């Protein structure tokens, strides 16, 4: 979703550019440089971040011991915890028109933390630089094929979703949602999310 928005903004900026500065008609368009993901927080070498339906799990790479950053914790606590692995946040923003009500966001590369009333209520992982730093405890991540994901957990497609090829992983209250880039067993995961998100359904 963010990639599409970026392309639209680039198109609008290009349309406003004076003709004298435009590239020759026969030249190939040049994509803007994509920033490298940071993942350079003080605990990045020793701690991994696992995607979870209840929040984010911080996993000690040596012992495998995990601790949950649960939905409902204060915004400052959630931001500080992720910054220790992901590095400095990229930006903060607000959307007053989310279906779930006004929502605030803090973005770290491909990961966005969602907040309402100053509390951590959800996360969204897009197909962007840095996404490869995250996966579920069962190994499902951005780029995992549908057939592969269905081998390790319960995968349920959401019928008639306005978001496209939407699905849920797991069962009960601890589910992670996501979207495939296209139909079919070979289609790869393009986004993962949990908790409250700013979707127009």
Image: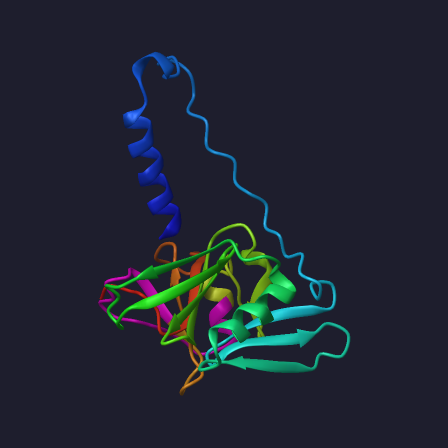
Q: Quadrant of residue 181?
A: bottom left
Q: How many numbered discs? A: 0
Q: Is residue 6 above or below residue 74?
A: above
The answer to whether 43 is drawn above or below residue 24 in the figure is below
- Whether residue 139 is visible: no
Q: Position of residue 86 (x, y in %)?
A: 61, 61
In x, y percent, where is residue 167? 36, 69
Residue at the location (51% across, 53% down)? 90
Q: Is residue 144 magenta?
A: no
Magenta segment: 149-167
Residue 26: % across, % down:
38, 13
The quadrant of the picture occupied by the C terminus is bottom left
- State left or right for residue 23 relative to residue 48: left
Please tell me which residue is depicted at 34% across the width and 57% down the height of the picture: 183
Q: Residue at x 62, y 52 (%)?
A: 38
Query: Does 181 appear above or below 23?
Result: below
Q: Position of residue 193 (x, y in %)?
A: 42, 68
> Image height check: is 38 above or below 81?
above
């Amino acid at each position: 979703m963010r990639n599409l928005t970026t392309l639209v903004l680039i198109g609008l900026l290009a349309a406003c550019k004076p003709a004298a500065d435009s590239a020759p008609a026969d030249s190939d368009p040049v994509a803007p440089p994509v920033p490298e993901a940071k993942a350079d927080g003080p605990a990045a070498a020793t701690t991994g971040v696992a995607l979870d339906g209840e929040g984010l799990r911080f996993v000690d790479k040596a012992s495998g011991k995990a601790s949950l950053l649960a939905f409902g914790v204060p915004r400052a606590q959630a931001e500080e915890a992720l910054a220790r692995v992901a590095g400095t946040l990229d930006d903060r923003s607000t959307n007053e028109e989310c279906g779930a009500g006004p929502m605030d966001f803090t973005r770290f590369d491909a990961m966005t933390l969602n907040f309402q009333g100053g509390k951590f209520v959800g996360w969204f992982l897009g197909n962007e630089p840095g996404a490869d730093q995250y996966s579920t405890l069962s190994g499902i991540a951005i780029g995992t094929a549908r057939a592969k994901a269905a081998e390790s957990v319960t995968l349920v497609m959401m019928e008639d979703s306005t978001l496209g090829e939407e699905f849920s992983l797991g069962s009960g209250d601890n589910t992670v949602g996501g979207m495939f880039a296209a139909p079919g067993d070979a289609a790869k995961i393009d986004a993962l999310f949990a908790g409250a998100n700013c979707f127009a359904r």
